[in-house]
Amino acid sequence: MAENEHVPLFETRQMKGRILFRSVAASILLGICFVFIYRVRFLPVGGNAERWTWIGLFLSELWFSFYWLLTTVCRWNSVNRIPYIHRLSQRFGEELPGVDVFVCTADPSIEPPSMVVNTVLSVMAYDYPPQKLSIYLSDDGASDLTFYAMLEAADFSKTWLPFCNKFGVEPRSPEAYFRTASEAVHVEEWILVKKQYEDMKMRIEATTKMNRIPEHIRKQHKGFREWDLVSSKRYHQTILQILIDGRDPNAVDFEGNPLPTLVYLAREKRPQFQHHFKAGAMNALIRVSSRISNSPIILNVDCDMYSHNSELIKYPLCIFMDEEKGDEVAYVQFPQNFDNLTKNEIYGSSFRVIQKLEVQGFDANGGPCYIGTGCFHRREALCGKKYDRNYKVDWKKLNNTKVEENASLLEETCKVLASCSFEHNTAWGKEMGLVYGFPVEDVITGLSVQCRGWKSMYLSPEREGFLGVAPITLLQTLVQHKRWTEGHLQVFLSKYCPLLYGHKKIPLKLRLAYSAFNLFAANCLATLYYVVVPCLCLLKGISLFPKISSPWVLPFAYVAFVHRAYSLGEFVWCGGTFLGWCNDQRMWLFKRTTSYFFAFFETILKLLGYSQLAFVVTAKVAEEDVSKRYERELIEFGAASPMFDILATLAMLNLFGSFVAIKKVILDGNQGSKIIDQFGLQILLCLVLVTINLPVYQALFFRKDNGKMPTSVTCKSIILALLACTLAMCYR
Ligand SMILES: O=c1ccn([C@@H]2O[C@H](COP(=O)(O)OP(=O)(O)O[C@H]3O[C@H](CO)[C@@H](O)[C@H](O)[C@H]3O)[C@@H](O)[C@H]2O)c(=O)[nH]1
Ligand SMILES: [Mn+2]
């Protein structure tokens, strides 16, 4: 045992492939330098249009290069962390700290209670001493449908938990388990539990469909009476119900084992008080849980992210409880993985490369950002404590906090903690808890925790920790990315700008890493320029790139080709398919020209005081035909949206550009080869864009299903693109 104490609980390893990464990056940098030399040396002297379009293109290239350099510097060093959970068990046995799990939900119509129940059951069933586990559900929808579903979950857990333990069930979300697992050895028990689960699901779905709880059910639990006072989800008192009190000796499953504590909370809402969306919900949970279980470790998950790995809690504990390096760590972040992705990830939602290669760079520079779900926090750090070198946790001592009040008394005393006015004139939302005022409460909170001196770490075990639901329509995806990039940009332009706020608090490289993420949206301008201007210049006969026969074409070709080829290599190395990479490239373009563009403008409007903070919750369900198209990997355009106007117009513009160019090449006879020489790269750029946009043309002109582009979008885009072309050709 004595020698064991010096064995670390986790190890840090350099990432593989660093030499390749660095050499490729260095060669690209050289290529970029040649591109810049070309741009400066061949700056057109005559012709206003020539000169200014050239300068504009140069500025775009400068921006791209700057952004690329930023991301490359942040990835220069990357590390992997490897936890050793058997060492944890050897050293601490059952003397493990309490863990509070927070699950957030906001709206039963787009986050169905049956899904929430699965997430809750999956975290209740962690392979962890149940006396040390407490689950809290925050319901910002204040819905009795969700409350009812939780009652059902509490009941079903008595069967589900022993079943999981007995047969080592994995994953422990019943829905996911019964969907994927084939009948186990103990067929009878398996069928019985499955039936019980399906009955429960049916009951929950029936009430959801009816949108009300029948009287006979309402009579079964005192909690329903609270809803007599609820006038709407924006106007109601705090509802707090301890559904399972882990301290109660009668709270046991059907085999007599203790159950984890389970709490339902809908914090008070009044229209005159800001509720701060998810950040507000999390802060209410932090306070309420501090009275009930007060565990030193907090895990937070979104309601759609079920636990996919029953051993998971022990992984971050290896980091927190490591004698040498553990005490400085404030949070341990797991990646966001999804279980509803199609083979070729049509909306590029897997974040493969980011999660398998890029965040590791963050980690090496001081710690990953907090991404809102799948994150284990040290309660003290989240609640505002500053790190200092003498900080040392005695985990054994921490285990001994006991509350005496009975459950109903506890419910009453806790309610005030979740009331609207509680935070008035306190540091909550500023130095305590999650930070308010941004649509990305997670990132800003992580940053401020790190600026208080803490580190964070990233764990990405072989078996994924959590699986969630990725948006299944294009519009939902674009709107989600708009919220994220808008939030990031707002952070960058606020007093929390990592470059300034983090000065002397966190390493420069970490500030740069944050800036790279914060500046996502700023990519929109350069991208739009690159998509629109070369095409218009082609129509007008302005050449913007070197001739094909000139040696200057080489650096352009090299940078473009190697950069993309390396990206493809990484994507495939991370487990993606070639088509998946192509889809990812398309989404790269779509997001930059729409989500980022809107995010950029809305941020400016907000700075000027014209726009308010909002949080558009992503839908986790869709109509059947939409789901079917998603499974067939058909992009869903079927809605009128300004985002689609932009996408369609850009697609049409490049189609016209390519068409005119090809016509010229073919019809102009012996001039043809000259045109190709002069405009080769520009034509190629247009053709690449046309290829990327093929599904857009299909949706505009050929599709018949409901996912096709609305006719209004088709008309608008043709008119706008024609107008732009005519203007370009006539403008002198
Ligand atoms: O007023 C609100 C709004 C949202 N939520 C919850 O917040 C979570 C995330 O919302 P979702 O619409 O699923 O957003 P995503 O874009 O999927 O979320 C990502 O981005 C968010 C920040 O923009 C983070 O909070 C999330 O953890 C992260 O997964 C969900 O559980 C919601 O129930 C609330 O509790 N209250
Ligand atoms: Mn989500």
Image (cartoon, grey):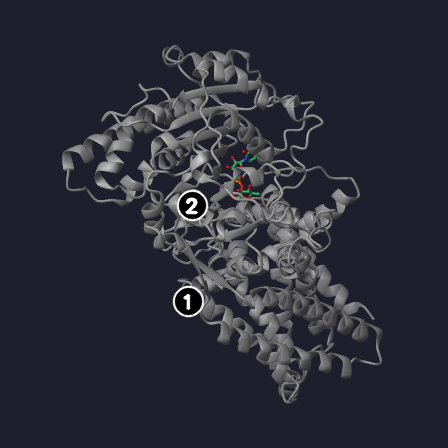
Residue type at mark 1?
Trp
Name the residue: 51% across, 42% down. Answer: 377
- Cα–Cα gap, marks 1 and 2: 30 Å
| Residue 591 picture quarter | bottom right
Secondary structure under the numbered disc 2 in the rendered image: helix
Is residue 112 shown left or right of residue 64? Answer: left
Which residue in the protein does label 1 denote? 573
Name the residue: 29% across, 26% down. Answer: 158
Is 384 rendered above or below residue 37? above
Beta carbon of the mark 1 residue lies under 8 A of ligand 1: no
Residue 317: assigned label: 2
Q: Which of the two discs, 1 and 2, labels the residue nearer the N terminus?
A: 2
| Residue 313 picture quarter | top left
**Relative to the observer, which residue lies in front, 265 or 565?**
265
Q: Position of residue 457 (x, y in %)?
A: 50, 52
Secondary structure under the numbered disc 1 in the rendered image: helix
Kindly check if marks 1 and 2 are in contact, taking CB atoms under 8 A apart as contact. Answer: no
